[in-house]
Amino acid sequence: MLDTQFPKPEGDIGHPSAFGVPTRRCIVTGAWPDKIVQSGAGLRNGRVVTPILQLVRRLEHDGAKAITTSCGFLVLLQKEMQASVKIPVITSSLLQLPGLLGLHTKVGVLTISSSKLGVEHLRAAGVPRERMADVVVQGIDPKSELVTAILGNRAAMDLDKARAEVVAAAIKLKQREPTLSAVVLECTNLPPYRAGIEAATGMKTWALVDDERLTRPWR
């Protein structure tokens, strides 16, 4: 998990009930959100890659059955993290995009930063080059309560205001592409608001916790 202090309500990956299976949460010290929500070059400049890979190996050694992360942007490290261990590693909700594109003409992505989420992240998630245009990315207002609280790593956040901002971004996405029926929530702090998104837009939301590969070892 990133090194954060903002509130984590039910539905957030940091909430104890997130997965419904025994979970151990380990913080990568110094992996603040603004270091991780980056391009590939920016991520590596943050000097967090080595500590992350070390922690992945330690978790496997300690008996973990699967490993995930608390930020969708870490999809950039999917191959490296998976190569470090033998257990399943699912770094990001974005890894569900290839499967969803097999079912839908277009798929939406709601992200904490549309300016930082680029083609390299989608390619790392396995999106074919020929389907890149079928992924419709919508960011949340950079000046919003949610974004400034998370990227600024504040201790407090107005959850009602954050909910309204996330739903507003989802509505904007649906207005841009009315045919959308599925949206992937890149940010693991967005699932607390998925009911509001679905009610306001009619789109089904897909979050990291929906990836069955994470809980398959318990079935």
Image (cartoon, helix red, strand yellow):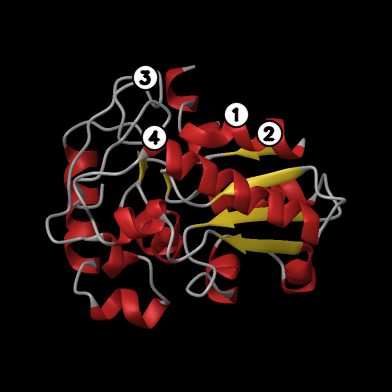
| Mark 2 neighbour class, 10 Å CA radius: few under 14, some 14 to 19, many 20 or more | some
Please, which residue is most extreme toward the left here? 29
Cβ atoms under marks 1 and 2 closer than 8 Å: yes
Separation of marks 1 and 4 at Cα, in angstroms = 13 Å
Residue type of the residue flagged with mark 4:
Asp
- Judge whether 35 appears above or below 205 on screen: below
Secondary structure type for disc 2: helix
Residue 1 image offset from top left, x and y in percent:
26, 47
Percent coordinates x, y for residue 113 in the rendering: 48, 65
Mark 1 or 4: in front is 1
Q: Is residue 22 above or below residue 103?
A: above
Residue where numbered disc 2 is placed: 198
Q: In the visual, does 24 lie left or right of 95?
A: left
Residue 12 is labelled as: 4
Q: Kindly report which numbered mark, 3 or 4, lies closer to the viewer in this rendering.
A: 4
Identify the residue shown where x is 60% and y is 44%.
Answer: 167
The Cα atoms of the two marked residues, 2 and 3, are separated by 25 Å
Q: Which residue is mark 1?
A: 195
* Amino acid type of the residue tagged 3 in the rendering: Val
Contact (CB < 8 A) between labels 2 and 4?
A: no
Looking at the rendered image, the disc whose residue lies closer to the viewer, 3 or 1, is 1
Residue 110 visible at all: yes
| N-terminal-most mark, 2 or 3 | 3
How many C-alpha atoms fall within 10 Å of the one at disc 4: few (<14), some, or many (≥20)? many
* Residue bearing mark 3: 21
Quote the CA–CA distance across marks 2 and 4: 17 Å
Which of the two discs, 1 and 4, labels the residue nearer the N terminus? 4
Circle 3 — which element?
A: loop
Residue at 30% x, 44% y: name it.
Answer: 157
Q: Amino acid at mark 1?
A: Ala
CB within 8 Å, label 3 to label 4: no
